[in-house]
Amino acid sequence: MAEAILSVAGLEVRYGALAALSAVGLELPEGAILAVLGANGAGKTTLLRALAGVLVPARGTVVFRGRSIAGLPPERIVRAGISHVPEGRELFPLLSVRENLLMGAWIRRDAAGIERDLARLCSEFPVLGERARQPAGRLSGGEQQMLAIARALMARPRLLLMDEPSLGLAPRLARELFRMIDRRRREDGLTVLVVEQNARLALGIADLACVLAGGRVVAQGPARSLLGEEFIRGFRLGDNPAGRTQAPEP
Ligand SMILES: Nc1ncnc2c1ncn2[C@@H]1O[C@H](COP(=O)(O)OP(=O)(O)OP(=O)(O)O)[C@@H](O)[C@H]1O
Ligand SMILES: [Mg+2]
């Protein structure tokens, strides 16, 4: 395995009195895809927001490419090489698709490289090229999700954090999206941490997986080994949005 690009240890994140994450530890090798699974409220979004600098951890260490980044503000974390696709996308609905993509490149000064990356993304997601001049708010939900991911890639991150990217996407688009992410990993060495509702889809492309419950890591290991686990089978296979095994009707 490659050396860890991201090491998290003893991470605690609080919302006032509530510890939404406790003692979370993770090691992510460079070029790997890690799927983070867990029921609603398990702390998945909180983990991504803490890694992206949106939340400041109460304790613990986050080391990215040999540097401590815990508690840095989001813009410093983007500059360090981490892009975050938040839950709910946070696009600029009145700006055009192209302007939204350019926003993603705000840390870059290489105009020619930016144009090359725009062209590459528009060939991967043709709808973004076809509708480049239209307001982002006029795209469908799934198209907006693609745009949010494409915008995050415009920063040329080494690590991409994605919060439920397949949410609202038709299954075909979700598979296409994951294929594109897998290509970025193979061609550019991108490392990915993805929170997914659809455990089957995520475990199908991830190398590693970790399961959160009540803010703690309750299982982690190679994605394939978790796919076989009994508790994954009864949990979040994409068809059970409550994240629980349905109790039989009395
Ligand atoms: N802004 C907030 N203020 C207070 N509590 C919060 C806040 N955001 C989340 N929480 C709580 O922290 C816990 C973890 O929430 P989080 O959003 O990280 O879960 P999640 O695993 O992403 O869930 P979902 O699958 O529903 O997106 C939950 O108990 C939630 O109610
Ligand atoms: Mg969430």
Image (cartoon, rainbow, N blue to C red):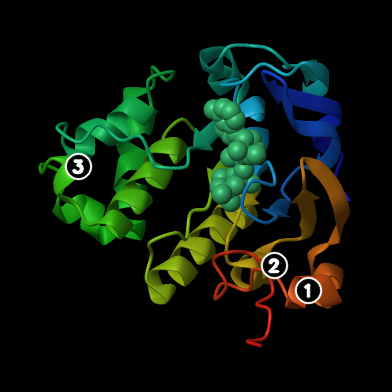
Marks 3/1: CA distance?
36 Å
Can residue 163 be seen here? The reply is: yes
Q: In this view, does 66 lie above or below 22?
A: above
Whether label 2 touches label 1, CB < 8 Å: yes
What residue is drawn where x is 73% and y is 17%? 70
Q: Is mark 2 on a helix, strand or loop?
A: helix
As drawn, the label of residue 83 is: none
> Is ligand 1 within 8 Å of the beta carbon of the residue shown at mark 2?
no
Residue where numbered disc 2 is placed:
203
Q: Identify the disc placed on residue 227.
A: 1
> Image quarter for residue 238?
bottom right
Choose the circle earlier in sequence order: 2 or 3: 3
Q: Which mark is residue 136?
A: 3
Q: How far apart are marks 2 and 1 (CA)?
A: 7 Å
CA separation in Å, label 2 and label 3: 31 Å
Q: In this view, does 186 lie to the left or right of 17?
A: left
The residue positioned farthest toward the left in the image shown: 134
Crowd rating for badge 3 (residues with CA inside 10 Å; few <14, some 14–19, many 20+): many
Q: What residue type is labelled 1?
A: Leu
- Write the residue at 70% across / 70% down: 235
